[in-house]
Image (cartoon, grey):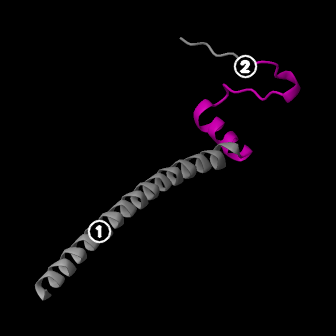
Amino acid sequence: MKKIVVITLMFSLILITTIVKNSTKKFEDETFLIKENIRSLIKDYEKSKLEFDYLSSAEKLIEYQQLYFENKLVQKKITEISSFELNHE
């Protein structure tokens, strides 16, 4: 009788350990995926913020004009701008 109780107890402990281990593994996998998604979203946010910060300031745009375009860019008033067309060549 003692042997049956001991064997049953051992079997139940092994079963419970297996169930807990599997559920913990699933939880860790989900946590890892969420962290990876957050990490990629943070990178995208940082790139967008950097681009916005540097390209939205008037001083930076004037500096880029002087560095790369020299006298090719002409300042226009907002009322003069009516449409924007792209040529796909």
Vertical comparison of 30 with 3: above or below? above
- Distance from Cα at disc 2 to Cα at disc 1: 60 Å
Q: Is tag 2's residue or tag 1's residue first in the polypeptide sequence?
A: 1
Measuring from the top left, give residue 80's x and y in whole percent: 85, 22
Which residue lies at the image location 82% right of the left edge and 19% below the top edge?
A: 82
Measuring from the top left, give residue 42's x and y in whole percent: 53, 54
Nearer to me, 63 or 4: 4
Vertical comparison of 29 with 58: above or below? below
Tell whether 2 sits left or right of 50: left
Vertical comparison of 67 with 46: above or below? above
Label 1 element class? helix
Which residue lies at the image location 69% right of the left edge and 40% below the top edge?
A: 62
Q: Which residues are magenta?
A: 57-84
Residue 59: assigned label: none
Measuring from the top left, give residue 65's x and y in whole percent: 65, 35
Residue occupied by mark 1: 21
Q: Amino acid at mark 1?
A: Lys
Which residue lies at the image location 58% right of the left edge and 34% below the top edge?
A: 68
Q: Amino acid at mark 2?
A: Phe
Nearer to me, 25 or 60: 25
Label 2 element class? loop
Q: Answer few, some or many: residues within 10 Å of disc 1's Cα (few below 14, many 20 plus, some between 14 and 19).
A: few
Tell whether 73 sits left or right of 68: right
Quadrant in the picture for the N terminus:
bottom left
Vertical comparison of 56 with 16: above or below? above
Residues at circles 2 and 1 in contact by the CB criterion of under 8 Å: no
Nearer to me, 59 or 84: 84
Residue occupied by mark 2: 84
Q: Answer few, some or many: residues within 10 Å of disc 2's Cα (few below 14, many 20 plus, some between 14 and 19).
A: few
- Examine the image and state in which quarter residue 8 appears: bottom left
